[in-house]
Image (cartoon, coloured by chain):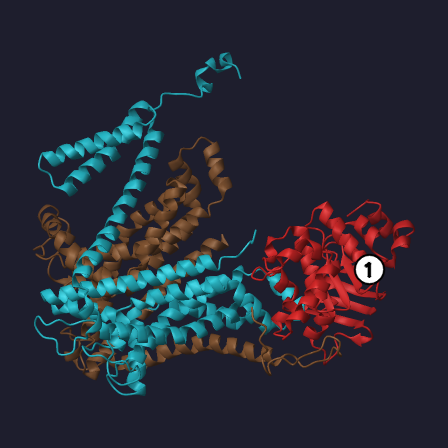
């Protein structure tokens, strides 16, 4: 530590002097800075709404040629929103079982000497930029999964997801949701891991003392305790998946449509991917349509996140 | 306890169990089965799947026959949990392998020092311009986010404790955490469209977009670190006649600095790989542009990867992998720095 | 410096924690506060250097004067009060990022006061000698303060408090986290410090109050949820042999609390 004097900042009250002294100027200034910074966040969020509103609201109602061939804003945004939800849910279906299992692996199954590096590896997964995931999905995983596409379309065609002509290059929503699942796995895993680790040891030991096997202990002592935490982890993963752009924009060859079919060449396009792929267009009307869809995405993820927080709050209140 | 008392079946502590090392036995059998499948012409992946399935089914079934249903369930779940972990590691290893193998083949001195200015056909181009752009844009984001984020956290922990403004800010930071990254980009784009002119895409815009994503991370991590500084220490400083602001700047912050720096570096490593907001707010540019405030697009590494992939040419894909390796190394170096800083500043016990 | 308290009541928002305390604390003496848990003795102690203000919504009614000056007067800076009235806490709390040397100088360093090296060395040695710690740590002044034992840490905290040259030293159960040997060392130290400082100590331990103090104040609660109040304030000898109040006698003889 240095003992550098801070010129003019300290009123310099001599300990031997009278008790009366001005309150420190530094205190007032510093507090002011903190309040300003905090208020800036308020301003920033307000600005986000205002500027997106100014630029986006006209997009709700412009000439119909700007709605990517869908005729109206609703005609465009409904399929996009469907696809956004659909891709996110597919990713969740894949990611959640794995996340919970890996979280259990770290918190209850693996020996400590393995659990620590495993947790580190999963965190590493979270650090990989989404564009690298997208590249890998488009160039490596997609082509690799082509036979799987063909097999699914041949043998499981009775399911609407696989009923149609399979893609020949694997750049499909099927591949994209697997990549999306890998991307949201770390966040779900790390939250689950935390709530699992918070299970009171007493509950666990009580279960074991009653003669439960490890799995029974987890089912009857850990899961009930962790339920609300797990739900909020899933919701946060969902929120992440809804806003994720690059993986889908880079992997799935898109089309604005509502369809459950996920292994073909025309894949339902998500809001974020639609914006990313249309951003170069320069007509102001088209841009405000994109911004308007962005507003819808914002509102939608906000609702999902709010729901997650509400579930957490309710879980705590119990 | 004597054995005579335990003669009753009810109080018996032992029952039929699998022999010790049973899992290894089943494991070897499963590997053998996979190997057999491989010999019979099944692909490697198929053989591994067969081996794993054999273990997942064989081990619990054996337990079911010898022990009981509960034990079998337990062993099934244990197997599933281990398998899940194994499966999840595959994409990571595969991805890291691809990035290094394909990226290393692309990277050479020219790639790191050339831009893509007037590069056509098979001419050698590079991502120097994108690398500079990434450093500039991320630097701007850090310059905006770090002071605002840290001061906000200080307000929340040291001043606001539970008052209405603090509660509102905490809520808004939560909302900010959930902003989809592309929406942040749209915001910066909309903002500068109004302030500067339609279709404005430049480096500073990207920086603003990234800072919107970075601020909540900085606030959260700094808050956690400030909470870790015991109130005892604050009181000790007050009792020495130290004003509150000096207590914060000279005692609380230095005590928490390790964690704060770690959090900030991790936040930087998170936004440095963001693509979507930069695509929208900074645009793309094959030329070198080091001026963040000029009204011309600034290239960044993530956008470079994306545009090169969109070229859909052999060369484009190679460049994309090269960019991916550069970005991956940047992110990993930042993570490493975060870790090292965390270790260096870990509280000293001093014995 | 003497401390005069007249009709002091302490509030946390709407809750009245301590009611109508009046006392006169003699300069260069040791005054002990005893009483059952939650009776407000620590709360009252903290009002003597305005440390209770750290908790939002806490305020004091009545008058507290130190050396004739009202410490709650309109122009009084609480920071200046705390420089005159130092405090030692229940748990030893040296600053974890600082060495032993820097911990002693913390009051100056945190205030960015520039001191020349020889002068700083002199302050450190004087304070550490004053806290009976010099001989134990003089060879490792650069080591972190957290590396000391609990009792040494507490004496380091005392050194840190006296290094800013206060005139009053408040001690809030300074030995409750220490072993008996360290406790004895601190009690010896209190005896020595008495010649330079006015010391006010809160303790749970009645034997400790009897051993170290000249005057004792007994705080009690009328009932659970009621504010604490001062039952009796008298010279320690009288308090422990012939208290005025039957409640005091009951408490001291161990019949409750």
In the image, what residue occupies the spot 50% across and 55% down?
A317
In the image, the chain rendered in cyan is B
Q: Is the residue B48 above or below the residue C150 in the image?
A: above
Q: Nearer the viewer, residue A146 or A55?
A: A146
Q: Nearer the viewer, residue B252 or A6?
A: A6
In the image, what residue occupies the spot 33% across and 72% down?
B138
Q: Position of residue B104 (x, y in %)?
A: 19, 60
Q: Is the residue C76 above or below the residue A122 in the image?
A: below
Q: Nearer the viewer, residue A169 or B171?
A: A169
Q: Which residue is denoted by mark 1 in the rendering?
A: C31
Horizontally, is B256 left or right of B203 in the view? right
In the image, what residue occupies the spot 38% across and 37% down?
A215
Locate residue A262: give its quadrant.
Answer: bottom left
Q: Is the residue C64 above or below the residue C179 in the image?
A: below
Q: Position of residue B94 (x, y in %)?
A: 22, 52
In the image, what residue occupies the spot 70% across and 80% down?
A21
Colour of chain A, in one word, is brown
Colour of chain C, in one word, is red
Locate residue A54: give its quadrant.
Answer: bottom left
Horizontally, is A120 left or right of C132 in the view? left
Mark 1 falls on what kind of element? strand
């Amino acid at each position: 530590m240095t003992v550098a004097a801070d010129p003019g900042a300290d009123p310099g009250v001599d300990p031997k002097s009278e008790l009366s002294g001005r309150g420190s100027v530094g205190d007032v200034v510093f507090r002011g800075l903190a309040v300003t910074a905090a208020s800036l966040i308020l301003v920033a969020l307000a600005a986000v709404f205002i500027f997106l509103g100014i630029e986006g609201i006209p997009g709700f109602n412009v000439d119909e040629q700007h709605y990517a061939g869908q005729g109206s804003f609703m005609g465009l945004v409904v399929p996009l929103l469907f696809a956004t939800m659909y891709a996110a849910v597919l990713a969740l279906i894949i990611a959640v079982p794995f996340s919970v299992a890996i979280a259990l692996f770290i918190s209850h199954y693996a020996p400590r000497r393995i659990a620590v590096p495993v947790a580190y590896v999963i965190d590493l997964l979270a650090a990989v930029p989404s564009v690298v995931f997208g590249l890998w999905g488009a160039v490596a995983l997609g082509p690799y999964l082509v036979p799987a596409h063909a097999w699914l379309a041949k043998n499981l065609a009775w399911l609407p997801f696989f009923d149609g002509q399979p893609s020949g290059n694997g750049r499909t929503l099927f591949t994209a949701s697997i990549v999306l699942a890998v991307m949201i796995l770390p966040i779900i895993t790390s939250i689950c891991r935390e709530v699992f680790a918070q299970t009171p040891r007493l509950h666990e030991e009580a279960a074991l003392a009653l003669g439960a096997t490890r799995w029974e202990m987890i089912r009857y002592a850990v899961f009930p305790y962790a339920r609300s935490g797990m739900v909020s982890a899933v919701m946060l993963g969902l929120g992440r998946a809804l806003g994720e752009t690059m993986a889908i924009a880079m992997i799935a060859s898109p089309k604005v449509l509502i369809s459950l079919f996920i292994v073909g060449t025309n894949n339902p396009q998500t809001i974020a991917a639609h914006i990313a792929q249309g951003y170069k267009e320069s007509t102001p009307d088209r841009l405000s349509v994109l911004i308007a869809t962005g507003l819808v995405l914002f509102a939608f993820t906000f609702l999902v996140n709010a729901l997650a927080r509400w579930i957490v709050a309710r879980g705590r209140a119990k | 306890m004597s054995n005579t008392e335990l003669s009753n079946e009810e109080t018996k502590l032992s029952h039929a169990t699998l022999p010790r090392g049973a899992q290894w036995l089943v494991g070897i059998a499963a590997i053998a089965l996979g190997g057999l499948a491989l010999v019979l012409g099944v692909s490697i992946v198929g053989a591994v799947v067969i081996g794993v399935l054999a273990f997942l089914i064989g081990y619990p079934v054996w337990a079911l026959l010898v022990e009981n249903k509960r034990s079998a369930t337990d062993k099934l779940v244990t197997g599933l949990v281990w398998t899940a972990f194994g499966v999840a590691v595959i994409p990571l290893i595969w991805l890291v392998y691809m990035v290094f193998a394909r990226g290393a083949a692309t990277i050479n001195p020219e790639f790191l020092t050339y831009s893509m200015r007037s590069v056509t056909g098979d001419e050698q181009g590079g991502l120097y311009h994108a690398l500079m752009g990434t450093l500039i844009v991320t630097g701007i984001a850090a310059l905006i986010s770090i002071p605002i984020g840290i001061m906000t956290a200080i307000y929340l922990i040291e001043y606001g404790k539970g008052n209405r403004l603090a509660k509102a800010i905490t809520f808004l930071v939560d909302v900010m955490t959930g902003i989809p990254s592309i929406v942040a980009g749209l915001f910066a784009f909309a903002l500068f469209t109004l302030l500067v002119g339609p279709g404005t895409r430049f480096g500073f815009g990207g920086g603003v977009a990234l800072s919107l994503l970075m601020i909540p991370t900085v606030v959260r991590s700094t808050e956690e670190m400030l909470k870790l500084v015991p109130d005892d220490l604050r009181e000790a400083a007050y009792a020495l006649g130290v004003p509150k602001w000096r207590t914060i700047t000279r005692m609380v912050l230095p005590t928490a600095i390790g964690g704060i720096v770690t959090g900030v570096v991790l936040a930087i490593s998170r936004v440095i790989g963001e693509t979507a907001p930069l695509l929208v707010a900074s645009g793309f540019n094959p030329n070198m542009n080091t001026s963040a405030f000029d009204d011309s697009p600034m290239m960044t590494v993530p956008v470079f990867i994306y545009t090169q992939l969109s070229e859909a040419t052999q060369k484009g894909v190679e460049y994309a992998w090269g960019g991916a390796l550069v970005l991956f190394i940047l992110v990993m170096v930042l993570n490493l720095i975060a870790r090292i800083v965390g270790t260096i500043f870990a509280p000293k016990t001093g014995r | 410096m003497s401390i005069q308290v007249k009709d002091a009541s302490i509030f946390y928002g709407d809750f009245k924690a301590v009611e109508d305390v009046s006392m006169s604390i003699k300069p260069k003496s040791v005054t002990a506060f005893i009483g059952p848990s939650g009776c407000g003795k620590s709360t009252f102690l903290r009002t003597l250097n305005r440390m209770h203000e750290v908790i939002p919504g806490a305020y004091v009614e009545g008058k507290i004067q130190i050396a004739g000056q009202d410490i709650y007067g309109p122009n009084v800076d609480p920071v200046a009060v705390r420089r005159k009235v130092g405090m030692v806490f229940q748990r030893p709390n040296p600053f974890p990022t600082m060495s032993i040397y820097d911990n002693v100088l913390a009051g100056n360093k945190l205030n960015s006061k520039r001191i020349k090296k020889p002068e700083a060395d002199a302050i450190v040695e004087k304070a550490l000698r004053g806290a009976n710690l010099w001989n134990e740590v003089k060879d490792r002044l650069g080591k972190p303060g957290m590396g000391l034992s609990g009792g040494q840490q507490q004496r380091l905290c005392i050194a840190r408090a006296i290094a800013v040259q206060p005139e009053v030293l408040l001690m809030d159960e300074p030995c409750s986290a220490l072993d008996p040997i360290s406790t004895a060392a601190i009690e010896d130290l209190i005896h020595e410090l008495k010649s330079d400082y006015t010391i006010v100590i809160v303790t749970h331990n009645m034997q400790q109050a009897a051993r170290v103090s000249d005057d004792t104040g007994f705080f009690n609660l009328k009932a659970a949820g009621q504010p604490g109040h001062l039952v009796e304030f008298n010279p320690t000898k009288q308090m422990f042999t012939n208290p005025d109040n039957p409640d005091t006698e009951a408490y001291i003889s161990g019949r409750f609390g």
